[in-house]
Image (spheres, helix red, strand yellow):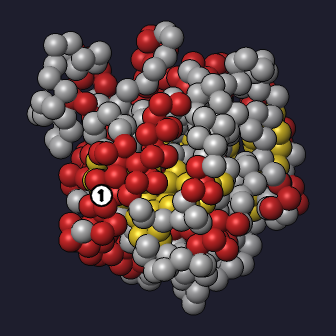
Amino acid sequence: MENQGEFHLQQRKGRRVILFPLPLQGHINPMLQLASILYNKGFSISIIHTNFNSLNSSNYPHFSFHSIPDGLSQSEASFADMVALLSLLNVKCVAPFQDCLGKLLSNSVDGEKIACLITDAVWYFTQTVAENLKVPRLVLRTNSVSSFLVFAAFPLLREKGYMPAQDCEPEAPVPELPPLRVKDIPVFETRIPETLHQVQLGLINQTRVSSGCIWNSFQDLEQVSLATLQKEFPVPMFPIGPFHKYFPASSSSLLSQDRSAISWLDKQQPKSVIYVSFGSVAAINDTEFLETAWGLANSMVPFLWVVRPGLVRGAEWTEPLPKGFLEMLDGRGHIVKWAPQQEILAHPAIGGFWTHNGWNSTLESICEGVPMICQPCFGDQMVNARYVSHVWKIGLHLERKLEREEIEKTIKRVMLEEEGQEMRERIMYLKEKADICLKQGGSSYQSLENLINYILSF
Ligand code: UDP
């Protein structure tokens, strides 16, 4: 365990916290990590979760799990229109959630007091339910503070004509939101643009009136954004991240992790391998998939590639690859469906991470000092990529069309050239900051103490 000596399991506090994760992998992981952090600080834990992407409770025998019917049909339970899915979940879960929470509040176990509810910030309908049932609601925002501020600025961006971009030069800076350019403004493909407006308003307004907000981030990483946030949102803020460094690699994966990735890495040279993964939702077309494959092959750099079933639109798995592709590489490439990512990034053989810049992946890379190649696909990923490449300067942004020569060149720049080494030095510095912030006296350590005292004060 990373912080042994400082992070002991504490005496039970006779208080229970109820958590409600959004049923997406990138939101489930940090919520269950937060649950473990609070459990180790002496709180009892109840988790309410939807049937959709239901959680595997067997990994957490010390928590109590309560499943609610989300009422999604098979066609509705799809990532194809993420905004529509989030909006629908916020409508369909109201009654079952209220019912479940009401029962938990009235049937307290062993006379334990229920201290508060912690929901994902995207579960915006829960604020009204919490107010009706008179339980304080804290929110967990699982993305970066910087991207949250961009979401909060959507009305302004609309007013100024950036959303949807009207006659704006994609490279032009957005003076209202440095360091963003027009093309870094989060994009969401959705059938009904008005839904995006609703979800954004729900997320921002219901965070503004919550009892506080918890962040999987840390002061030294997002100091400027945290200061702005504190000015613009008058609720207590608790940046206590990076969550996953409180424990050994966590186990809230919805897909089973292929451990052959680790045994393959064990045979590779230190810092020689590029790890490629675009997370749990992003998808590419088969042309992009083939360009990726040939870019990796032509770079001559060993690669470990997560090809999630569903990554390539219209394909089951890797069938668009030319026959014998991996065999031709003579062991220089390894493909899995899903990997133990935290362990992989911490493996000595890893030298770079080609990522979609989901916030968890970005933070996990920073915490292991692994420089990145950024290929954001949608939403907050665009903002994270801009910070990685332009503010922290710990990665290169693959900005042009996904094309094999460009990919090959970018991989070589990060893995083999001086500029990659410089990025590695800068990210190692941030890794040290991440380690320090969790130790006694560090900013996240202190913020967690504040959070515990705050929850006890309810
Ligand atoms: N992940 C994993 N195995 C994989 C790919 C990803 O365990 O093969 C985990 C990764 O460690 C991270 C999460 O899935 O914690 C993905 O979250 P992120 O915010 O990076 O992206 P999202 O999936 O939400 O787009």
The answer to whether residue 345 is above or below residue 126 is below
Q: Is residue 384 visible?
A: no
Q: Secondary structure at mark 1?
A: strand
Indicate the position of residue 228 as horizontal and vertical percent values: 24, 47
Instruction: Identify which residue is drawn at 18% across, 43% down.
Output: 179
| Residue occupying image coordinates x 74% and y 73% | 12
159 sits to left or right of 19: left
Vertical order, 302 against 293 (above or below): below
Q: Quadrant of the C terminus?
A: bottom right
Task: Examine the rendered structure and indicate whether residue 99 appears above or below residue 294.
Answer: above
Residue 220 in the image, given as x and y percentages of width and height: 29, 66
Q: Dividing the picture into quarters, in which one does residue 312 lie?
A: top right
Mark 1 Cα-neighbour bin, 10 Å: few <14, some 14–19, many ≥20: many
* Camera-nearest residue between 355 and 457: 355
Across and down, in percent, residue 130 comes to: 64, 35
**Residue 50 rendering spot, x and y as whole percentages:** 76, 35
Give the number of callouts.
1
Question: Ligand 1 within 8 A of label 1's CB?
Answer: no
From this view, report whether residue 457 is shown above or below residue 41: above
Q: Residue at x 51, y 29 (%)?
A: 285
Quarter residue 310 falls in: top right
User: Who is closer to the viewer here, 147 or 117?
Assistant: 147
The N terminus lies in which quarter of the figure?
bottom right
> Which residue occupies the foreground of this view, 199 or 178?
178
Q: Please tell me in which quadrant of the rendered image residue 23 appears.
A: top right
The residue pinned by badge 1 equals 395
Image side of residue 225 versus residue 216, left or right: left
Residue, far bottom: 5
- Residue at x 60% of width, y 78% of height: 266
